[in-house]
Each structure stands twice: as structure tokens, then as C-alpha cells.
Image (tube, rainbow, N blue to C red):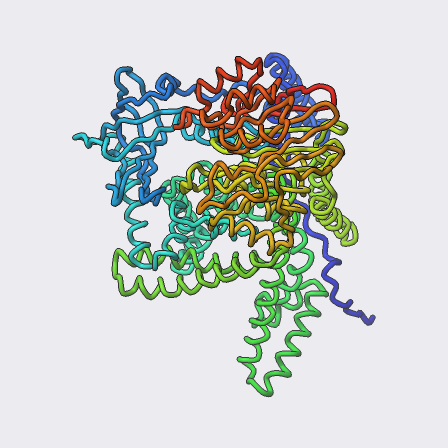
Amino acid sequence: MNSTIPAFNPFAFRPKSVRQPMFWAAAAFSSGIVASKYAWRPPLWLFVAALVLLLSAAYLRHHRIRSSLIVVYSAMFFTGALYFQARQRPPLDTSILALTNGDPVRITGYVAQDGRIQPASFGQFRQLLDFQIEQALPNSTHGLVRLSIIGPGPLTSFHYGERMQVAARVRPARNFGNPGAFDYAGYLEDKGILALASARADTVVRLPGQGGNRVGRWRARARSSVLEKLHQLFPEGQAALLDAMLIGEEAFVERDVRTDFQRTGTYHALIVSGLSVSILAAAVFWTLRRLCNSALFATLITIIFCCGYAFLTQEGAPVWRATLMNAIYLIARLLYRQGSVTNALGAAAFAVLAFDPRALFTASFQMTFLCIFIIGAIARPLLQRSTQPVRSALANWDVPECSYYLHPMSAQLRLDLKSIALALSQFLGSTIASRFVLATTRSAIAVFELLTVAMLMQAGLALPIAFYFHRAIALSVPANLVVVPLLGLMLPAAALSVMLSYVSMSLAHISAAFTGLVLHAIIGTVRGVGAVHLADLRVPTPSHAITFAAAACLITAALLARRRSWIAALGLSALLAGDLALMVVPAFPTVHRGALEMTSIDVGQGDATLLVMPNGQTLLVDAGGPTGGQLSRLDFGEDVVSPYLWSRGFSRLDAVAITHGHSDHIGGMKAVLANFHPRELWVGLLPPSPELDDIIQQAHALGIPVVRHWAGDAFALGGAQIQVLYPPRDTPVGRAPSNSDSMVFRVSYGQTSALLEGDADAFVESQILRHYDPRANLLKVAHHGSATSSTEPMLTAVMPRYAVISDGFQNSFGHPRPEVLQRLSNSGTHVYRTDCLGAVTFLLDGETVVPVPQAR
């Protein structure tokens, strides 16, 4: 009987079904933790439910196995809920908060983490370090603070264990009081830090003796030694990047470089992440397997290396989670269980959540385990269906008898490839032709698998990237296709350079030269892709409906990946549809239709005010920024104002206005223009200023019209009326921005109105009183409550019922000044302050003004 070998069809292969009970148990356990956080129930109820379900599972295990598994998973759900309530984090010592009254205090202690010296403002330098207080006079307070030492350079570096006494001002760690703000206080609390402190360098007195412990000193010395070697081997710019990529020291990475990596979706390459641990673990394991035949020895040494690397980086939970996952995978591989990646993922999740169940709610935990879930549950089945038959055809290439044991389709492919090799042997010789066909095919498989995994990873991570970072994945796939393989070469080469430097600097420089070339290629790729306009696509916080739909699409793709080819294709289509929805489905901003909204956003000692008109159109007045031109690692537009607007669902602004050119008003404006592409930029006086010039140039580059407004202008916007009161068109322009440049305008709706003064001083207020009636129900107090503004004649003319002051918590200017608060009190005005309340919102419905509390 003749038998016909069918044509090669890789999709005819069905991936092997893999049991993964640990994964489903971990999923149920995690669901219980989530339910316990948002829907509290008495612990006794949870205990009884878990116990009853476990007893039921024990009874059913011999009769109905499938039913018993469902009951077990239900029991894990209630166990997770119970454990979350029982596993309370030990309380921190809060006695240090007694020192946060703003008065200077002399504290004694030791350095708990090495400081790094960076440029500050006005020719000063800053050293930021963690400081363990042993004694604070006159109180006996203990605790950990983040200490900033400021002084003229060069400052002396302080290292772990060094004891000193310093006169400092201590203040509590505080978040910006806006919805969507980063939980900086919670971030510090996870590190045991409850307060911030600042001191002048000339108040520091070194003390004899050592603090801390021996293990901490070993780690600090090893870390400092590695950083020193990196700066010896590489130019300053490359060394700064390698500090961050290899050892987790981000102090010297410039903001623009960081932004480029974020825009291209390659930020994971700039920091020590789970990817870094996995790359180095793979390099160590591969090297050891080539040097010895013992898989057990290679596994143990690799795990020890990963633990030592995680200990050295001081990056905390994210790196330790990646280390744990690699360890579990290597052990599973040693036990011939490497096929069940998702099962190993479940075991790792159990271990992490048993240590700290609150880790489930962190972005790093979710993204680390989501990456591995995508690889194990989606990418691996698809690659088994597509490339595994081809790999089978290449196995034991030089053994002809193996063809008899292959699947017919793999055997057919093997025969075709050997025929190609035979044809090429006439020109290249049989050995070279055979190796050429083999190498070409394997390279094509590797490229295809890399493309597949990269695309699936980016598609699967679209939801957390949009939710946490407000970025779309438009160009992250092509960027990662280049950056990730290069990172796989660069990190081992950089680590090898450091290790060789302790033996021979000549050998180390050879490896460092290769590392530098690869790093240059990474930087070039990031900058090239980042220059494309599509790379800067920002999205607001996804709505609950879009979040649920995108998550459902991801789960659907995972559940269907092992089904028939057309069913798996439907799963991938669902995943793509979820990603497109995140990018193109318009957000529905939270607005109050039929009312004029004025919100003073908490930007510290600065100004940023959002006006939402009755029909939903928006105007942002100023965008915050550092005070007095100080250097700041914080971009107020990107890190403070934009998250608030995204949390409200805004993706576009109708107009933005600059009252005047001081940094605490315009420092965040460039990021706002880039993120929200307003239809107009309003400006008044434009004195010589590099910062103002940069903003104007950026507006022109983005195609945003720049509109000059002068006193007397009156126009409608979104159902409200706007009247500009200052500056007059003939106002002389000074040689630098000043408070008297401030654009002042009045926004009215019906019988209600709000007056926004910027930083207008007494002179500006007097000019307004000469020509206009500034009466308003709501006053945005000028100059953060400075005594140079809010004069009695002005308050008498305005007669505000409510006033809001935008000022920084415990600011050094003493704003708002007591005399200003007294004037407002005398005029019968109810005062609201951002330093006390965070973002403050008022609704003007045409008849009344109502303050609205912000939900944070």
C-alpha cells in the first residue's frame, strides 16, 4: 500500500497539555487576598469556610477528583483572604514624627546606605543617604530617615556604618495630595523610612566608632568597589548607565535619558529588573554547563550567584522575586519538570505572597509574574505548535536513522533540508553545505521565536503599562526586538569586565571595549525610536470597563493557546483587540456638566490650576515646578500634574496658560504640552528667559498656536466668560521674569465667578483696581499667600466667599503669611490650602460656589 507523506503543516501539532495545579491554587489564593482587601469579612467566617471546604475536598478526592479540585481551589480562596488579614506588617517606630514640627534638631546616628553626591542649585551639591538615628536631642527618638546634606563642593562622601552628628530639619514623608499621585510615603515606608531630613554640610560632625552590622559593611564595600571599577573602565556617560543597568545605582542617569527609555518601552533595560537577573543567570548557567557535565553543580552555583547579585544590588523585593523564580525554574529543570513553567510560577507566587501578601498590589510583582505567565501560558504553546516540529527535524542531524522516529511532517521537512544541503554541496562541499543549512535554519527559528515572544510580551503587558505608566505600546515591540538581545550581550560582558578588572585591567579593557560598543548600540536604538512621534503616545488611566475587557482578552488568549489552531488564533485576536481598545477607545473624563470647576492641584510650593468649563472644555493655568530655579529630579509636569489629569480621564486639553515665567509656574509646562497637546498656549508678557523660550519653541514644534492675551480681552470658552485684567498691552518688559508680569483673569459662569491672580503683587493689584471691578465669589490667592499680595483694598473689592492658597508643606518662605490669613479672615473668607488638604476643587453652578472634597 502506498503511503503519502502529508505536506508540512506545523499547526497540525497540538501542544501537550500540562498540569498546573500550583498555578491555579496561587490564582485562587491571590483572588482571596484581593477580595479581603476590598471586601472585608470577619476572620472567623473565613476560617470556617476554608475548613469546611478542605474537609469536603478530602471526602471527594476518591469519588470525584475534578469536583475535589474545584473545592480545594475554593478553599485556597478563603485561605488567602484569611492570611491577608492575619499577616499584618509589624508597626514601625513612629516616635521620629515628634521631631517633624519644623524646628531644627541635633541628631546622632550612622549611615545606613551610602550617599551619592549630585549637583544641586546655585553651585551647591547634595548628598542623599539613609540615616539611622541613634539619638535625637532633646528627645530619645530612634528611626530611619532619608537625609539630604547640602553644601558647596566638593562634599565628603559618607559610607555605610560611619557615625556622625548633624543639625537637621525633619519633616514627615508626604505625598502630593492629588488623585493619581505616586505613593512616595508608602514607598519610603516599605524601606522603613517615615521622615525626610535636610542639613547643611557645615553642621556635620564625624563621630568615632562604627554603626550597623558586619554584613551591611561587606555589602557596602563590595558595591562601592564595583561602582569604582565601572568608572575606571568606562567613560563617565557610559559608566552612569552601567551603574543603573548592572548594579541599580540610578543617581547619575540624566532625566532625558530616563525619559527616552520610558518612551520606547525599554525602561526595564535601564534598571536592575527580573530581566537582568534572568540574563545573568542564563549566562552563568550556560558557561558552567560548558565547563562541567554536572547539571546539579551548575544549578547550585547559578542560584548562589543570583542570590549574591540580588544582595549586592540592594533593589529589594523585585530582584529577589526574580531570583526566586529563576531558582524554582532551575530546580524544576533539574527534576525534568521544565515544561510546566506556569506551575513553577504558581510555586514562586506562593512563596512571595507567604512572605508579604501586600506585594500582590505592587506594579513590580504584577509585571514580573505577568511576563512569566505570558511566556508559559501563551508563547510556549504557540512555539510548540510552530517551531517545535522544525527543531525536531534538526535534532541529531548527522544520524540518518533518526528520521524513522520522527513525525511524518518533521521527517518531510528534514528530507527537504537535506535535499537543499545536497544541492549546495556542489558549490560549498558537503560538510560546509550541511552546516550552513543547519545554522541558517536554527538562526531563522531563533529570530522567529524572539519576535514571537517579544510581540506577545508587549501585547500582554499593554494593560499594566497603560495603567501604571500611561503609555501605549506603539513602538515598544521594535525597540525591544533590538534592545533585549543587545542587553543579553551587554550585561554578561559588563559583569565579566568588572570581574576581570580584579585580575588584569588589560583584559578588563578588552571586554569593556566590547561592552561599550553594545551599550552604544542600545543607546542609539533607544534615541532613534524615541525620536519618532508615535513613541510618545500617552493614554489616561483606563476605565474599569476597559481594564476588565483587556484582562479578559489576555486570559482568553491564555486559555485558548493550547486549542486547535483556529481557536488559538481567535485568542490572539482577542488579545490584540484588548490592546487596541487601550489605545483608541476614547476616555470619558470625570467632569461636572453644567458647572464651572476650578481645581487647585497640589504641586507643592508652586501653582497649577485646572478649569473645566460647563460644557467640558478645559484650561490649565500654570504647571508647577521647582522653586526659585532649583534643580530637581522631579519633573512636575510629568510626575505631578499629568498623573492627576490622567486619573481624571483627560487625554487632551483645550488650552493652557502661563501667568508668568517663574520656575514654580512653568517648570512642568513642557511635559504638559508633550502629553496633552493643547489646542492653544496663552501667554502675556514675555521677558527674556531661556525657560520661556524653550516652551514657546516646543509649542511651535508641536503645532500649538501661541496666543497673546492682554488686559481688556474678553471672550467665551466652553460656556464660561473669561476677562483678562492684566497686563496692559503697553506694559514695559523687564530684563527677567517677575511677579509683576502675572496674567490675571476672571472666569465667570452665570452669577458666579473666580479670580486667578498668579503671583500678582501689590502694584498689579492697584492697577487692576484702577480699571476693573474684580469682584468674584472665589479667589485664587496671589503668590502662595505672600505678604506682598492680597492687599486690603484688593480683598475689599473682590469680596470673595472662598479662597484657595497653593503652597508647599512646611515651606521655607513661611507661606501663607499670618497677616494674609488675618486679612482673609477679616473679610469673612473661607480659606482652603493645598498644603493641608491636597488638591482643592470648587464648583460654580451659576448661582452658588460649592467646595468639593477630592477622593484620593
Residue 141 location in percent, x, y? 31, 18
- Name which residue lies at 47% across and 43% down: 737
Residue 170 sits above or below residue 470 on the image: above
Q: Can residue 373 be seen in this view?
A: no
Quadrant of the frame with the C terminus: top right
Q: In which quarter of the image is residue 529?
A: bottom right
Q: Nearer the viewer, residue 308 or 16?
A: 308
Q: Is residue 384 left or right of residue 763?
A: right
Residue 8 sits above or below residue 782 on the image: below
Residue 728 location in percent, x, y? 58, 40
Residue 787 location in percent, x, y? 45, 24
Residue 287 sits above or below residue 5 on the image: above
Q: In which quarter of the image is residue 619?
A: top right
Residue placed farthest to the front in the image? 770
- Name which residue lies at 69% across and 47% down: 583
Residue 270 location in percent, x, y? 47, 50
Residue 132 sits above or below residue 156 on the image: above
Quadrant of the frame with the N terminus: bottom right
